[in-house]
Amino acid sequence: MIRIRHLCKSYQRGDQVLTVLDDLSLDVAQGSFLALMGPSGSGKSTLLNLIAGIDRPTKGSIEIEGLDIVNLSDSQLAAWRAENVGFIFQFYNLIPVLTAYENVELPLQLTNASASERRQRVEQALAQVGLSDRMGHRPNELSGGQQQRVAIARALITSPSLIVADEPTGDLDRAAGEEVLKMLQRLNSNQGKTILMVTHDPKAASYAGAMVHLDKGQLESQPVAA
């Protein structure tokens, strides 16, 4: 599904050039659950953002389902991202004044889905994460684990083929974190979602089917079984 070749990402800091990713190549099969591990500053979140189309590389190619997203215009990339990628963040990124239902519905507001179709899909997504009875609650009325499950429902609402998760359990206690990780496992095994997860936690990585380690902007190996 994902084919990355000779990927480089650098930033200009005054007179210095900071290289975050250096000539990185990686293959990820469709339906994989891959953990990206490495120390702070290793480039794992940068790699995730490049694959998700949030950022652009300095050099190299990123082919996803045969499409090199590096060659897309900004508007084409935004449209591709909205249709194909679901995002899960460490700090949930829910809008405080909106209910769980409204937060999950938000990505559908950018589509042509009717009000009745949006309602059906939102209710299905919240039921899938076990929050049918919390859809009218705002984020401050939910636990951290419940907020992350709302974020997962939001990531699923457009039926993306790729889910990217950046430290999805980093702000959760152990029990809530395990619940979220098991949910990601089910999405991968039952629905065939391709999942890329950045984590520094070996226990979290063990829920993935494979892992890669990054260090100083380079891969130490191709995916190996977790």
Image (cartoon, helix red, strand yellow):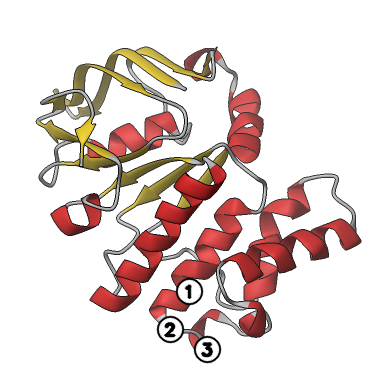
Q: Is residue 85 above or below residue 58?
A: below
Numbered tag placed on residue 143 in the rendering: 2
Spot occupied by residue 28 in the image (x, y as percentages of width and height): 36, 25
Which residue in the protein does label 1 denote? 147
Q: Residue at x 35, y 17 (%)?
A: 4
Q: Secondary structure at mark 3?
A: helix
Residue 29 vs residue 91, the one in the foreground: 29
Q: Is residue 171 visible in this depiction of the protein? A: yes
Residue at mark 3 to residue at mark 1: CA–CA distance: 9 Å
Q: Residues within 10 Å of mark 1 (few under 14, many from 20)?
A: many
Q: Earlier in the sequence, mark 3 or mark 1?
A: 3
Q: Tag 1: residue type?
A: Gln
Q: Secondary structure at mark 1?
A: helix
Q: Secondary structure at mark 2?
A: loop
Q: Residues within 10 Å of mark 3 (few under 14, many from 20)?
A: some
Q: Is residue 102 above or below residue 69?
A: below
Residue at the front extreme of this rendering: 190
Q: Tag 3: residue type?
A: Glu
194 relative position to 95: left or right: left
Q: Tag 2: residue type?
A: Ser
Q: Is residue 61 above or below residue 210?
A: above
Which residue in the protein does label 3 denote? 141
Residue at mark 1 to residue at mark 2: CA–CA distance: 6 Å
- Circles 1, 2 touching at the beta carbon (< 8 Å): yes
Q: Residue at x 65, y 24 (%)?
A: 76
Spot occupied by residue 181 in the image (x, y as percentages of width and height): 35, 60
Residue at mark 3 to residue at mark 2: CA–CA distance: 7 Å
63 relative position to 109: left or right: left
Spot occupied by residue 111 in the image (x, y as percentages of width and height): 79, 45
Q: Residue at x 46, y 55 (%)?
A: 186
